[in-house]
């Protein structure tokens, strides 16, 4: 147990929280229905990733390098690096925004000295240092235990949603009754919802940690259960984030332009503690993912290029691995500290980019999963395989609609 629950939950990062909250703020409960097919697809793909990691004892990037041409692998690396860098920036944006919610509510910038801004800057820098030291100085077992502990704090969003006193009948109707709007804003948010729940980086991280943990074929069934539980838990949390936002921002027709607006809007409606819970959940999720995203990128690039990887190795034993990890943390924190950086837009665009790239990575995943030489008796075939290809086709259609909608002047 561990890799599946950690990987899936880490998907509810700052960008994910922003995307879910904006979905509720703009469209109320009407996008909740997308969580059901997305959860099914997340269970399906993480299950494949689990079997790949156990049966091959290799990370996904290493498998792609061996199976496909080096040129395709290099193209993949560029896409992963760009998408993951944008997402890493969004994690530090989430850390800054979580402290901004508190500093604005307490009016810490009201005096001559902008204590709120100072607090936010210190928080971003300190978080980067803590994440770096935690990974570089830790071991896989210790890191995994801390990550599993951080998973527990996502309960903050469930409590926050309950405090918002939503219309549960409307929420359950939105969950089970599909509604579709051919509107560019609606499609942008829908692709963002998919892209924040099922991200390309998660397959690389999950595969690598399953292999590094050394899970045997005898324990495969437990590892698969771990992936299923993680997939369900992450979307249960997503459900409550959308509900909290729909019950407050959408219900009161408020306009939000930043992620801090979302947390602050809870204060007058659901109470100060609901806003602080939102901020705490955002900080926890951002700090969690600020460690995992750079790690996933380091695993991916080093595996693809044949360099040493692993948290159990020292900096001297895996210099490229830790250099990539360190570089992403430093750059991610620096970008966020640029005055006037559009934090909410960075968060949302990074998730939509993941949604656009997802079909490409699904092709690689399915081609590997149907290879009997790699997977043995666990190779995908028949209806189970067809479901994967059909899902990939639906994602491509959504991506096309997202690009076409503005040119056809569909909706807003």
Image (cartoon, grey):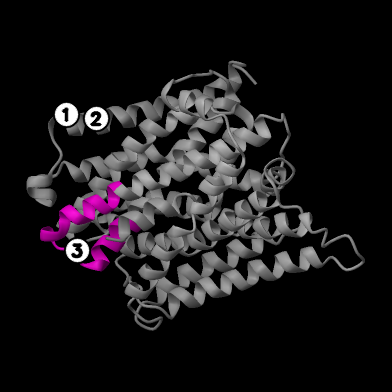
Q: Which residues are magenta?
A: 205-228
Tag of residue 269: none
Rendered-image quadrant of the N terminus:
bottom left
Question: Between tags 3 and 2, which lies in front?
Answer: 3
Mark 1 crowd level (few <14, some 14–19, many ≥20, 10 Å Cα): few
Gap in angstroms between the C-alphas marked 1 and 3: 27 Å
Q: Is residue 154 left or right of residue 25?
A: left
Q: Position of residue 358 (x, y in %)?
A: 40, 40
Quadrant position of residue 161:
top right
Say what secondary structure mark 1 lies in: helix
Mark 3 crowd level (few <14, some 14–19, many ≥20, 10 Å Cα): some
For the point 59% across and 20% down, which residue is it?
407
Q: Is residue 122 above or below residue 224?
A: below
Q: Position of residue 52 (x, y in %)?
A: 20, 52
Say what secondary structure mark 2 lies in: helix
Q: Which residue is mark 2?
A: 387
Say what secondary structure mark 3 lies in: loop
Q: Which residue is mark 1?
A: 383
Q: Is residue 175 left or right of residue 366?
A: right
For the point 29% across and 50% down, which residue is it?
227
Mark 2 crowd level (few <14, some 14–19, many ≥20, 10 Å Cα): some
Gap in angstroms between the C-alphas marked 1 and 2: 6 Å
Can you name the residue that lies furthest to the left here?
377
For the point 34% across and 50% down, which residue is it?
230
Tag of residue 215: 3
Quadrant position of residue 223:
bottom left
């Amino acid at each position: 147990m561990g890799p599946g629950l950690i990987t899936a939950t880490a998907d509810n990062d700052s960008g994910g929280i922003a995307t879910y909250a904006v979905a509720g703020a703009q469209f109320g409960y009407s996008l909740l229905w997308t969580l059901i097919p997305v959860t099914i697809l997340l269970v399906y793909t993480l299950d494949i990733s689990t079997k790949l990691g156990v049966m091959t004892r290799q990370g996904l990037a290493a498998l792609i390098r061996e199976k496909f041409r080096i040129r395709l692998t290099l193209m993949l690396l560029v896409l992963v690096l760009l998408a993951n860098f944008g997402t890493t920036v969004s994690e530090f944006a989430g850390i800054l925004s979580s402290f901004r919610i508190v500093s604005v509510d307490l009016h810490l910038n009201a005096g001559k000295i902008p204590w709120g801004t100072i607090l936010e800057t210190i928080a971003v820098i300190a978080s980067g240092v803590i994440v770096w030291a935690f990974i570089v100085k830790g071991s896989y077992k210790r890191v995994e235990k801390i990550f599993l502990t951080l998973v527990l704090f996502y309960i903050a969003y469930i409590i926050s949603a309950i405090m918002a006193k939503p219309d549960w009948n409307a929420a359950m109707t939105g969950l089970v009754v599909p509604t579709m709007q051919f509107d560019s804003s609606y499609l942008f948010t829908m692709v963002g919802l998919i892209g924040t729940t099922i991200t390309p980086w998660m397959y690389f991280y999950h595969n690598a940690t399953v292999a590094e943990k050394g899970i045997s074929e005898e324990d495969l069934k437990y590892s698969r259960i771990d992936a299923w539980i993680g997939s369900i838990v992450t979307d249960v949390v997503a459900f409550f984030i959308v509900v909290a936002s729909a019950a407050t921002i959408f219900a009161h027709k408020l306009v939000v332009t930043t992620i801090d607006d979302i947390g602050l809007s809870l204060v007058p409606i659901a109470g100060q503690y609901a806003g602080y819970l939102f901020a705490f959940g955002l900080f926890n999720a951002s700090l969690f993912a600020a460690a995992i995203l750079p790690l996933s990128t380091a695993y991916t690039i080093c595996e693809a290029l044949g360099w040493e990887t692993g948290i159990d190795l020292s900096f001297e034993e895996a210099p490229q691995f830790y250099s990539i990890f360190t570089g992403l943390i430093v750059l991610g924190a620096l970008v966020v500290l640029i005055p006037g950086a559009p934090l909410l837009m960075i968060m949302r665009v990074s998730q939509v980019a993941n949604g656009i790239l997802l079909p490409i990575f699904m092709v690689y995943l399915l081609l590997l999963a149907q290879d009997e030489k790699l997977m043995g008796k666990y190779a995908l075939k028949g209806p189970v395989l067809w479901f994967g290809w059909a899902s990939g086709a639906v994602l491509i259609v959504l991506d096309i609609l997202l690009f076409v909608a503005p040119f056809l002047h569909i909706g807003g």
